[in-house]
C-alpha cells in the first residue's frame, strides 16, 4: 500500500453531479474526500457548510477531510463533527485560542488538523505538535482554486518534517494548492504524505488515472 494519501477536493467537482463524483472517487485510489468550507470572511469566497458534509456522509464511506477556512472555527466544530467529518482541520490564523480549539476537536472524537497559510511560520505550532493528527500546509493563498504552487512551500515542508522526526511524532503532513503530477514528486520528497488536489483531478480526462499519478504509481 502506498504511503502517499490523496484527498481530492470535492469543491472542484460539478455540483450538479456530486453523487457521480463521489462514486468515481470511491472507485479510485482516493483515500479521503477533502471538503473546503469557506465563509467569505477568513477567505474571499463562500463554498458550502454542514449540509454538504452531512449529505456526503450518507453516500460514502470514504473519510471526510473537512478543512474549515472560517473565522472562529470553535463555533462550528461540534456541528461538523455531528455532520460526519472524520478529520476537522482549522486555521491557526483564525483561532484566537489555538489549544482550546484543538481540545474541542479532540473532545468530539475526531482527528484534529491545524492549517497554516503560506506565510505563517511553523513556530506557532511549537507547543501543540504533539496534540494534533495532521498539519495542513497551504501552498497557495487560500480562497480560490487553480492557483500556482508557491515554491517556498517545499522548504516549509522540509522543516516541518525535521520537527516531526526530531520529536518522534507521527502526525500527517498535508499540502494543498497548485499540486499536479508534475510537481508532486518534489512535494512528497519534501516530507508531505497527504496530497490535496482539486482541478488537477476533476478537470483531468481520466480523474482516476490522475489520482494514481499523484500517488506516484504511474
Image (tube, rainbow, N blue to C red):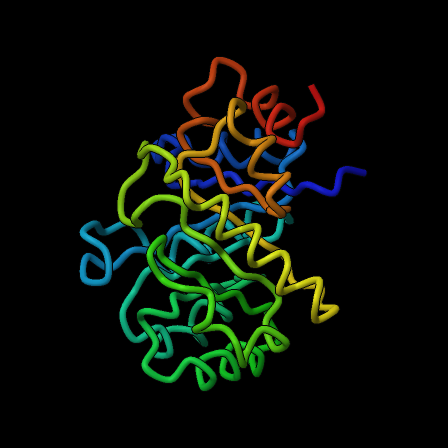
Residue at 61% of width from left, 52% of height from top? Answer: 63
Image quarter (top left, top right, bottom left or bottom right) of the N terminus:
top right
Residue at 49% of width from left, 82% of height from top? Answer: 104
Q: Residue furthest top?
A: 205
x%, y% of residue 23?
57, 33
The correct choice, above or below, for 153 with respect to 116 in the image is above
Pick the front one: 87 or 140: 140
Q: Is residue 204 left or right of residue 190?
A: left
The correct choice, above or below, for 190 with respect to 81 in the image is above
Q: Is residue 7 left or right of residue 1?
A: left
The correct choice, above or below, for 60 with respect to 17 in the image is below
Instruction: Give the total of numbered labels.
Output: 0
Pick the front one: 158 or 115: 158
- Quarter of the image holding residue 107? bottom right
Residue at 39% of width from left, 70% of height from top? Answer: 92
Q: Residue furthest right?
A: 1
x%, y% of residue 88?
50, 65
x%, y% of residue 197?
47, 36
Q: Is residue 179 left or right of residue 160?
A: left
- Quarter of the image holding residue 199? top left
Pick the front one: 124 or 66: 124
Residue at 55% of width from left, 56% of height from top? Answer: 159
Pick the front one: 70 or 191: 191
The correct choice, above or below, for 103 with respect to 149 in the image is below
x%, y% of residue 126?
52, 76
Image quarter (top left, top right, bottom left or bottom right) of the C terminus:
top right
Amino acid at each position: 500500500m502506498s504511503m502517499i494519501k490523496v484527498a481530492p477536493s470535492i469543491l472542484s467537482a460539478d455540483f450538479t453531479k456530486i453523487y457521480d463524483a463521489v462514486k468515481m472517487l470511491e472507485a479510485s485510489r482516493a483515500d479521503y474526500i477533502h471538503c473546503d468550507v469557506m465563509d467569505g470572511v477568513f477567505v474571499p469566497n463562500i463554498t458550502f457548510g454542514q449540509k454538504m458534509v452531512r449529505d456526503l456522509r450518507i453516500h460514502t464511506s470514504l473519510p471526510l477531510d473537512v478543512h474549515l477556512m472560517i473565522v472562529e472555527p470553535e463555533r462550528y466544530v461540534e456541528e461538523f463533527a455531528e455532520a460526519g467529518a472524520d478529520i476537522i482541520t482549522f486555521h491557526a490564523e483564525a483561532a484566537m485560542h489555538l489549544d482550546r480549539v484543538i481540545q474541542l476537536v479532540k473532545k468530539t472524537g475526531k482527528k484534529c488538523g491545524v492549517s497554516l497559510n503560506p506565510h505563517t511560520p511553523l513556530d506557532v505550532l511549537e507547543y501543540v505538535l504533539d496534540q494534533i493528527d495532521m498539519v495542513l500546509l497551504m501552498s497557495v493563498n487560500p480562497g480560490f482554486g487553480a492557483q500556482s504552487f508557491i515554491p517556498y512551500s517545499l522548504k516549509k515542508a522540509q522543516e516541518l518534517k525535521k520537527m516531526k522526526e526530531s520529536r518522534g511524532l507521527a502526525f500527517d503532513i498535508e499540502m494543498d494548492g497548485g499540486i499536479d503530477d508534475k510537481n508532486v514528486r518534489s512535494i512528497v520528497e519534501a516530507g508531505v504524505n497527504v496530497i490535496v488536489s482539486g482541478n488537477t483531478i476533476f478537470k483531468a480526462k481520466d480523474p482516476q488515472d490522475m489520482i494514481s499519478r499523484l500517488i506516484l504509481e504511474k
